[in-house]
Every structure is written in C-alpha cells, then in structure tokens.
Image (cartoon, rainbow, N blue to C red):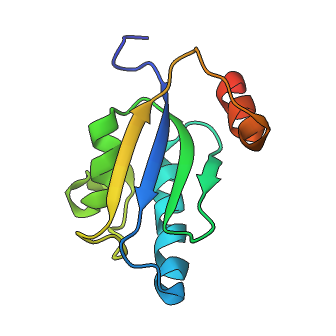
Amino acid sequence: MTSAEQSHQFLIIVQLGNTEPARLQEVVPEVKLILEKLSSEPLEIAFRAISADIFGFLVRTTRAARQLEAALLRPSNFPRASGFEPPSGLDNKDHVFVLELGPDCSSSQGFSRALTWIQRH
C-alpha cells in the first residue's frame, strides 16, 4: 500500500449558519450520507452542540482533508465515479473544518466513545 493509499482518521466539524428545524432535517442526513460513502469504517459522532449548529464526525478514509472538505462544500465538483449525488443542503453560510488525527490522544468521560473509536479504527 502506498502512502497515498493509506487510510487516515479525521475529525470533521460542520458549523451550520442556519439551524431552522426543517433545514437540520435535510442537511444533517446529507452530511452523514456523504461521510459514510467516504469512510472505510462506520462513522462515529464525536460531538453535537445542544443547539445543533455545530457537530463533528470521526471518519477513516484514504482521501485527503481537502477532498473531504470539497465533498461536503462543493459536492457537484466531486467525481461522479464516486457515486455522489450533489446535496442541496450546505451553503456559503456553513463551514467545514477537517482535522487529521494522530495516535496521541486523550479524553474525559464525555468523549470516551469518540476516544474508543479512534483507538479501534
């Protein structure tokens, strides 16, 4: 396996500009579906704000951080061969942050599920 083919763990944080309940019902499942298609392992939610305007998923993939960001913010530019249908949910008021995770990590009780995912995947 070449270094380009090695999978990496990422924390993907999405901050929504508009959190009307109808929009949340549309956007959050679309984001999750895109990330499920990109991840080689089952997703894990790392956190979700009570207000639901910001949330994070843990993903393992061979793709680069910029590709993950582009798949969420500009899905129509993402190669069709990957099987994506462009979602309509995210707009220019929404923000995506992609952070590659390393082997050194720790958490308190509130994030123990996320830590377990990182250690096992």
Residue 39 at what x, y percent from top left? Answer: 52, 41
Q: Seen in the image, is 40 located left or right of residue 31?
A: right
Residue 85 at what x, y percent from top left? Answer: 36, 67
User: 118 or 84, which lies in front?
Assistant: 118
Residue drawn at the location 54% of the way across and 86% of the way down: 21
Image label count: 0
Above or below — where is 67 with respect to 85? above
Residue 44 at what x, y percent from top left? Answer: 65, 46
Residue drawn at the location 79% of the way across and 37% of the way down: 109
Q: Seen in the image, is 21 located left or right of residue 63?
A: right
Q: Quadrant of the N terminus?
A: top left
Residue drawn at the location 69% of the way across and 23% of the way down: 119
Residue 81 appears in the rendering: no
Residue drawn at the location 41% of the way across and 61% of the way down: 15
Identify the image quadrant of residue 108: top right
Q: Residue furthest right?
A: 109
Above or below — where is 36 with respect to 113? below
Above or below — where is 107 with respect to 54? above
Identify the image quadrant of residue 41: top right
